[in-house]
């Protein structure tokens, strides 16, 4: 997915009381925290977005401290949903919705400078009033005490903590790469966690094109099909458990120790007889003298019901092949 779509919403948009009174509500009346935000509406909106439905998000006005001044903003179906807010990790129901939780850890001096710039420019407050509101610990509902009591403790719920905020380009690049990797995952990988899909390259797509082409000769079809099967086998072997192994590597008159890997256990193959054992040659080419057993799964009756194989029978079969 080269150009994923993103949907963004701020947690403040779901505020049910004035923004300047939020700090007071959080610190002096902890029991009414759930009334500060319309969490039910937030959860319902996120659920609709996750199920492919567009939603109308309230548009919060930071001057009047209300979310009904401006018309709601329509948010359409997107590949990535970004929900942002300083108190976003407080509610466990909201946290459960998230696939990735990020805490942006900004220096206290930077936060203070941003607060002074915003309140003096946008709200026409003098610096003395701003500083008093930020750091007056005689009243628990001011900014710094509220941060220490309610925002900073939620840091423990984050999967990723980004120091220096937007200036940390390395952390941002890693997050972007992780999201792109998740978006590029095959849908079956999201259902079966032990399923691995080989990353598609131009070489693989080219071989797929050849074996799907009706003009391809039988000889070329077999050749390129075998190449694809070999890639599947080699990729699968890479996911088997390995253990560290040291070997002596002779180099002229001196010898050196090389630290490599070896399979944790001996390998055996089980061929399910359904397609003329088309993968056996590739497995034998990758694993010298590997033992391969065969299982035929047939269907009985007119309804084509598959005969189940008890796990104990499979276990004994594999033991016999292995030995």
Image (cartoon, grey):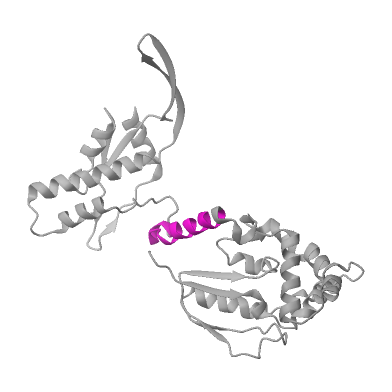
Q: Main secondary structure of the magenta part?
A: helix
Q: Is residue 54 left or right of residue 297?
A: right
Where on the picture, by quarter, is residue 73? bottom right
Q: Is residue 23 magenta?
A: no
Q: Is residue 32 left or right of residue 160?
A: right
Q: The N terminus lies in which quarter of the figure? A: bottom left
Where on the picture, by quarter, is residue 71? bottom right
Question: Residue reaching furthest top?
Answer: 253
Q: Nearer the viewer, residue 309 or 149?
A: 149
Question: Relative to residue 137, is residue 225 depicted above or below?
Answer: above
Q: Nearer the viewer, residue 60 or 286?
A: 60
User: x, y percentage for residue 67?
Assistant: 67, 86
Question: Relative to residue 207, is residue 128 depicted above or below?
Answer: below
Question: Relative to residue 157, is residue 281 depicted above or below?
Answer: above
Question: Relative to residue 282, is residue 57 depicted above or below?
Answer: below
User: x, y percentage for residue 131?
Assistant: 83, 70
Residue drawn at x 43%, y 50% is 194
User: x, y percentage for residue 154?
Assistant: 71, 61
Residue drawn at x 73%, y 65% is 111
Q: Nearer the viewer, residue 57 or 272?
A: 57
Total tally of numbered discs in the picture: 0
Residue drawn at x 45%, y 53% is 193
Q: Is residue 34 left or right of residue 320?
A: right
Where on the picture, by quarter, is residue 56? bottom right
Residue drawn at x 35%, y 52% is 197
Q: Is residue 184 magenta?
A: yes
Question: Residue reaching furthest right?
Answer: 138
The magenta stretch is 171-190
User: x, y percentage for residue 286?
Assistant: 27, 34
Q: The C terminus lies in which quarter of the figure? A: top left
């Amino acid at each position: 997915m080269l150009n994923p779509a993103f949907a963004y919403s701020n947690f403040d948009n779901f505020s049910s009381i004035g923004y300047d009174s939020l700090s007071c509500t959080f610190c002096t009346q902890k029991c009414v925290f759930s009334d500060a935000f319309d969490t039910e509406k937030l959860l319902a909106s996120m659920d609709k977005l996750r199920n492919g439905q567009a939603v109308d998000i309230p548009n919060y006005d930071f001057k009047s401290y209300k979310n009904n001044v401006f018309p709601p903003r329509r948010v359409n179906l997107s590949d990535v949903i970004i929900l942002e807010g300083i108190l976003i990790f407080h509610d466990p129901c909201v946290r459960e919705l998230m696939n990735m939780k990020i805490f942006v850890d900004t220096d206290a001096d930077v936060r203070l400078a941003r607060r002074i710039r915003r309140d003096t420019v946008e709200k026409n407050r003098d610096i003395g009033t701003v500083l008093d509101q930020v750091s007056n610990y005689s009243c628990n509902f001011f900014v710094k005490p509220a941060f220490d009591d309610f925002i900073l403790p939620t840091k423990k719920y984050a999967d990723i903590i980004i120091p220096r905020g937007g200036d940390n380009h390395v952390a941002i690049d890693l997050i972007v790469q992780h999201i792109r990797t998740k978006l590029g995952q095959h849908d079956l990988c999201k259902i079966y966690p032990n399923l691995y899909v080989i990353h598609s390259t131009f070489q693989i797509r080219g071989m797929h094109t050849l074996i799907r082409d009706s003009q391809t000769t039988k000889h070329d079809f077999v050749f390129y099909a075998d190449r694809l099967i070999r890639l599947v086998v080699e990729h699968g072997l890479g996911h088997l458990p390995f253990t560290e192994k040291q070997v002596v590597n002779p180099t002229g008159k001196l010898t050196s120790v090389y630290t490599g890997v070896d399979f944790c256990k001996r390998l055996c193959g089980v061929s399910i007889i359904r397609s003329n054992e088309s993968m056996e040659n590739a497995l034998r080419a990758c694993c010298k003298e590997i033992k391969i057993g065969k299982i035929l799964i047939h269907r009985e009756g007119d309804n084509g019901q598959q005969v189940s194989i008890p796990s104990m029978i499979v276990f004994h079969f594999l033991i016999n092949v292995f030995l």
